[in-house]
Amino acid sequence: MTRNASIKKVLAQDYQHGFVTDIESDTFAPGLNEDVIRRLSAIKNEPEFMLEWRLKAYRHWLLLEEPHHWANIKYPNIDYQALAYYSAPKIKKDGPKSLDEVDPELLRTYEKLGIPLYERERLAGVAVDAVFDSVSVATTFKDKLAEKGVIFCPFSEAVHKHPDLIKQYLGSVVPTGDNFFAALNSAVFSDGSFVYIPPGVRCPMELSTYFRINAANTGQFERTLIIADRDSYVSYLEGCTAPMRDENQLHAAVVELIALDNAQIKYSTVQNWYPGDAEGKGGIYNFVTKRGACRGVNSKISWTQVETGSAITWKYPSVILQGDNSIGEFYSVALTNHYQQADTGTKMIHIGKNTSSTIIAKGISAGYGQNTYRGLVKVMAGADNARNYTQCDSLLMSDHCGAHTFPYIEVKNNTAQIEHEATTSRISEDQLFFCLQRGLSMEDAVSMIVNGFCKEVMKELPMEFAVEAQKLLGVSLEGSVG
Amino acid sequence: MIGEKMLTIKNLAATVGDKIILHDLNLTVKAGEVHAIMGPNGSGKSTLGNVLAGREGYTATAGTVEFLDHNLFALSTEERARKGLFLSFQYPIEIPGVTNIYFLRAAVNAVRKSRGDEPYDAMDFIKLIKEKAKFLHMDEGFLYRDVNKGFSGGEKKRNEILQLLLLEPKLAILDEIDSGLDIDALKIISDGINQLRRSDRAIILVTHYQRLLDHVIPDYVHVLSKGKIVKSGGPELAKELEQTGYAGL
């Protein structure tokens, strides 16, 4: 296929997904009101129920306050009327034409992370070729999934093709008015992923946003909905270890997971959005609402996250353990360097009988980074024999950083067994000296010690992802000790 | 080869914090030799090893140290290690979450890389390490446990010797490698050290006690007291000290 033909093909597919206007020039003026939402919905050619849903969310959002008061993060007020809420996907004309035009610092990082050449082009925003690659890969994937009846498509496509599933499940785990950022997302979400695994199907591959056409254009208000029907299994990978740059400073995504009887969902994230520079200028604000519902008996939802990017991370992937014998898991590594701030953790809500949850949270603070674990374990009155094990460990790499732990436990059933362990330690001079004395460089020594600290979480990641994530921790901490 | 200069310390003074621990220390070690440094607690034995290895907080304030052809103090901690200086730890360090075999392969490959040698791949390294572990009567299970975590005192010391055998340094400084060992373990560790004696390598044993020196016979014995070497002699000096103690010095 020639280059021109492949561009045309990509553009044609965008069209197919519901963009009816002249997509090259279409970006809204800043500001948010009901008209903006109507226009947004119209551009996406959405059915009436979607527009109603967005408007309801918007009207609720107006009543909510930004959660400034309780989260352990500081940032300037965001003027929501100064943001533009729609920007059409387009092939970047202004982007670099080849890797020769890309910031050498960025390329050096790609190299350290071991990212293949063709992928570096895509990540650095080099025009055309990379897009062609990902389209062809994605097509192969789609055929294989279709064979099993698995639906994996852009959210905007699912709204048209599977409206019943959307109506039934959208907002059923994170209601439109759940919190300030979730309400905003519900009103103006741009696009995202939709996954449905039919009963009895084990999804034959790891589903990754990387392979979804359009992934680059989901923008700042991403929406993901994953439904695992009874007796099914799916593993979903989100994000990417390479440093991601984005013109939009505010990101407010919502992810909803639903597991029916005996179903399992494993959701893994590596988040490496631009964290700002060494002085704390710039960087993404990442306000995410992620929640899973174990609706069915014996269902299981497992969140694994490695968070190294963003200037601000505000994120609490949670599990509602409704079904009897259901299991919730949260494995997290959050790293803050320079002036990054992370307030992250989880909520485990035990409703069904014999439900169990495990929380392993590892926080690493370097430079002037501030790292907060915030978690809630709640056992409702009917949740007989609920069990939770929580372990929070903090590793400090400098004299100026901070580690904070806010564990909340609410128990209304006296058969519950709740365990909580927490440690805070400084990276040990002895360990570093030992490694150096055996010939390792300071960078390798730090990377090894930190990865050892995070091992319990890293082993939960799918293999290829884990290898990348290990390198990422090392690269993110470069120069932070010594 | 035998007789070539390995380590030449001239008028060394060193501080830890603002405390002077070593002063006017002179020592010459040549390839092929084994030196024992003895002395009472607080005489500066461990400080000497740490200063030579380049540990943070241990500062040389006067004198010179030549290691092979290098000005030792011009080299970073890891460069010293890569050029063949090895320090065993009196209290071996734990690294949770990092398996012994992973750590050792990373260390050995870092040293090989600095010399321009090909790194070991996983299979070759497993073969090599199993052979060395067997020599030290170490169960293979040790290789897959976290570095020193949950090891007994004797197991930790054996693990230090395993590192020594794998890294094959030019100059090994063994700091109280005999402390906390029972007779059998002492024998195994001594066999490990003796296996390393070679014409192009030197060993410095830092110890309180004579008993290690019954198994690893040194060429020279030095007595360190209050930060300087006050007496030097052959292996008979160690036996003499065993009789008279350090008090008479």
Image: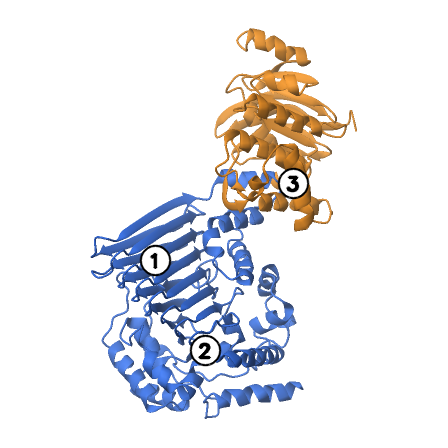
Image x and y of residue A181, in percent: 32, 72
Tell me if I can see residue A284 in this picture: no
Which chain is indicated by disc 1? A
Asked whether A270 or A460 is in front, the reply is: A460
Asked whether B44 or B245 is in front, the reply is: B245
Letter of the chain shown orange in the rendering: B
Number of other residues with Cα within 10 Å of mark 1, as a class: few under 14, some 14 to 19, many 20 or more? many
Chain A hue?
A: blue
Image x and y of residue A461, in percent: 49, 60
Asked whether A480 or B164 is in front, the reply is: B164
Tag 3–tag 2 contact (CB < 8 Å): no
Which quadrant does the N terminus of chain B fall into? top right
Q: CA distance from mark 1 to mark 2?
A: 32 Å
Residue B191 image label = none
Identify residue for label 2: A218
Q: Residue at x 63, y 28 (%)?
A: B173
Image x and y of residue B6, in percent: 72, 29
Q: Nearer the viewer, mark 3 or mark 2?
A: 3
Identify residue for label 1: A357
Check disc 1 and give the amino acid type: Ser
Number of other residues with Cα within 10 Å of mark 3, as a class: few under 14, some 14 to 19, many 20 or more? some
Q: Quadrant of residue A293?
A: bottom left
In the depicted structure, whether residue A128 falls above or below residue A404: below
Identify residue for label 3: B130
Are dots 1 and 3 on a single chain?
no
Q: Quadrant of residue B154?
A: top right
Tally of marks: 3
Q: CA distance from mark 1 to mark 3?
A: 40 Å
Assign a secondary structure to mark 1. Answer: strand
Are dots 3 and 2 on a single chain?
no
Which chain is indicated by disc 3? B
